[in-house]
Amino acid sequence: MVDDDQAMRENLSECLASEGYVCWLEASADDALRRLELEWELPDVILLDLRMPGMTAAEFFSRMKERPIWATVPIVLMTGACEDQIPSGLPTDAVLVRPFAISHLLDLLNGVVEGGATVPSIRSYTVHP
């Protein structure tokens, strides 16, 4: 999970941990890329905040696509932005618009992680207000 809001990271990670998920928590896209460099295993999915200081979401997506193995990791964009404020062309696999129900997030993750969903079916979990 990549989000500059510490409370958001902690709250969501507690919810996910109670469901058996293991979370890496990073405060910036730069930190997330450094973490990916150090880890032996890839995450099953990346939850990425749209607006953070430093590297933009678009730059993060671009950097993820530079390495073929990283490009396989689904990315779910989390945002409080209105739909028209989300940059078009981001190759996100799903969008969770805040506030979202934790049940929506869990449904999405169950489809991605446990069900081995492919990118086209992940899109069916896109949540809009």
Image (cartoon, rainbow, N blue to C red):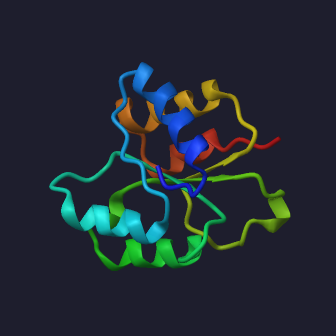
On the rendered image, what quadrant is the C terminus found in? top right
Establish if 40 lies above or below 18: below
Q: Nearer the viewer, residue 84 or 5?
A: 5
Establish if 30 lies above or below 80: below
**In this image, 122 relative to 65: left or right?**
right
Establish if 10 lies above or below 59: above
**In this image, 55 relative to 17: left or right?**
right
Establish if 106 lies above or below 81: above
So how many labels did they put on this image? 0
- List x then y, in percent, for residue 33: 35, 68
- List x then y, in percent, for residue 77: 60, 55
Q: Nearer the viewer, residue 18 or 116?
A: 18
Q: Residue at x 60, y 72 (%)?
A: 53
Q: Nearer the viewer, residue 59 or 10?
A: 10
Give the image quarter of residue 91: bottom right
Identify the residue at the far left of this view: 40
Identify the residue at the far top of this view: 18
Q: Residue at x 37, y 56 (%)?
A: 73
- List x then y, in percent, for residue 96: 66, 45
Q: Residue at x 49, y 64 (%)?
A: 28
- List x then y, in percent, for residue 122: 53, 44
Q: Residue at x 74, y 65 (%)?
A: 86
